[in-house]
Amino acid sequence: MKWSFDARIHRADQISKTHPAARDLLTFYRELAVFQKPIFEALRARSETGVGALAPYFPPLIELVAHLGPPGLADRGQERLPNAAAREDLLRSAWEDGAAHTLAADPIGRFFARVLLQPYAEYLASRGDVQAEPEARICPFCSSWPVAGVLHAEGDGAKRWLLCAVCSTEWPFRRVLCWNCGEENKDKLPIYTAAEFPAVHVDACDNCHIYLKSVDLTTDGHAVPMVDEIAAVALDIWAEEHEYSKLETNLLGM
Ligand SMILES: [Zn+2]
Ligand SMILES: [Zn+2]
């Protein structure tokens, strides 16, 4: 596992001090990562591979969200997932139908499912080598969509990988290629940066108007992509104002 839950928690602590505008989001994210870590560890200790093993975590998750989440989210979660049958059904459909992007029309179900599916999917992915096909549109392990790009140093430059929104597997994906529509014309693939986020930029496409944020580890080796992606929420606001949209949301649904 490239970025442990401890690394995510530490990074959220660290950058909530330097990114005051995203502090509330990072604080909530941090508590979700603290909640996810023992789930990952318990699944690993028991070699548990059944998705139903996640169902008992719903009540404490709803409680955590009631205390620390955005107003109303816990109540809506309770309404959407009133009993064990509804919870197990959500987990199974979110996992078996090729993961959370199938729940785009159900943001409440998607949020709760993904908090629990992430440590589960990461545990399953950690058990073996995932054969990543370059330029694949979906995650080679769990078929989810990417939540961000990650730039790793290679030779004198950087190579882009995509980071799965659910299991955190990475797979290589050329920089001058739109993940969504396959556009290859460099002039139609602008990259936007902002001085306040030196290690995060917007990879946009002027053909399909979709964007992904990329986290550049060659600029900041301490960055943890799933956390830095959340901290740079101002770039999402900017992108949306410029009529680009994101197909896959992060853990917080943004
Ligand atoms: Zn995946
Ligand atoms: Zn495109």
Image (tube, rainbow, N blue to C red):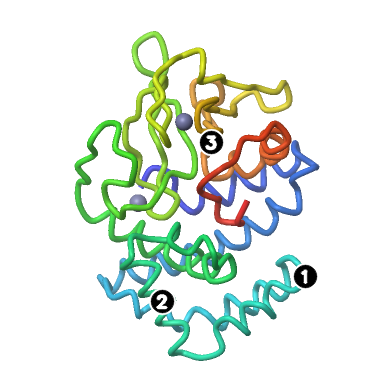
The kind of residue on which mark 2 rests is: Leu
Q: CA distance from mark 3 to mark 1?
A: 29 Å
Nearer to us in this view, 119 or 99: 99
Q: Quadrant of residue 29?
A: bottom right
Q: Residue at x 39, y 19 (%)?
A: 184
Given this view, does label 3 or label 1 mark the residue nearer the observer?
Answer: 3
Given this view, does label 1 or label 2 mark the residue nearer the observer?
Answer: 1
Answer above or below: position of 224 versus 48: above
Nearer to us in this view, 2 or 243: 243
Q: Position of residue 236 (x, y in %)?
A: 67, 39
Instruction: Quickly name the residue at label 1.
Output: 71
Q: Residue furthest right?
A: 20
The kind of residue on which mark 3 rests is: Ile
Instruction: Quickly name the residue at label 2.
Output: 54
Instruction: Quickly name the residue at label 3.
Output: 210
Disc 3 or 1, which lies upstream in sequence? 1
Q: Is residue 50 left or right of residue 79?
A: left
Nearer to us in this view, 69 or 15: 69
